[in-house]
Amino acid sequence: MEQQNTLYHPSFEHDNCGIGAVVHIDGSQSHGVVDDALKIVEGLEHRAGKDADGQTGDGVGILTQIPHGFFSKVAKRQGIALGEKGQYAVGMFFFSQDKAQQDQAKQQFETLAQCSCAIK
């Protein structure tokens, strides 16, 4: 048998993972799109939708556009001035429980974010 020069192997293939997409092709926002996406999530029977106990999941979710009106209102209450719609980003980070590593990671992110802002 010929040796492959690749990291792919058929044994890595798994079943029951996938993606569902619900969009307005023109980019308009609506609660209907979110409702339809949640219906897809509710119908999932594999591990992302329901865990072994049939009650909980371990990672399924939906991706939406940034709700600019909501973010602006909340940021203003915190004394943070956001840019215009589409001029900022939102992120979720999972930091180490170790305080020193957490502080280091936050500092690295702040440095990268400041550098990125300066490259306009």
Image (cartoon, rainbow, N blue to C red):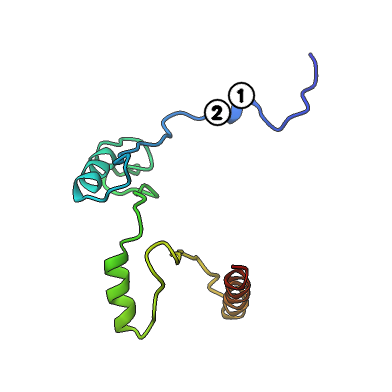
Q: Is residue 46 found left or right of 112 in the rendered image?
A: left
Q: Nearer the viewer, residue 51 or 91?
A: 91
User: x and y percent of residue 49 in the render?
Assistant: 32, 42
Q: Is 96 placed above or below 100 here? A: above
The percent coordinates of residue 115 (x first, y second) are 63, 72
Q: Position of residue 17 (x, y in %)?
A: 43, 34
Q: In the rendered structure, which amino acid carries the disc numbered 1?
A: Pro
Say left or right for 13 vs 44: right
Q: Decide: is 93 above or below 14.
A: below
Cβ atoms under marks 1 and 2 closer than 8 Å: yes
In the rendered structure, find residue 13 and report the number of the disc placed on it.
2
Please identify the residue farthest to the top as the structure is shown. Answer: 1
Q: Quadrant of residue 117?
A: bottom right
Which residue is at a point 44% across and 65% down the rendered structure image? 87
Q: Identify the residue shown where x is 34% and y is 84%.
A: 78
Q: Which mark is residue 10?
A: 1
Viewer-side residue, 8 vs 92: 92
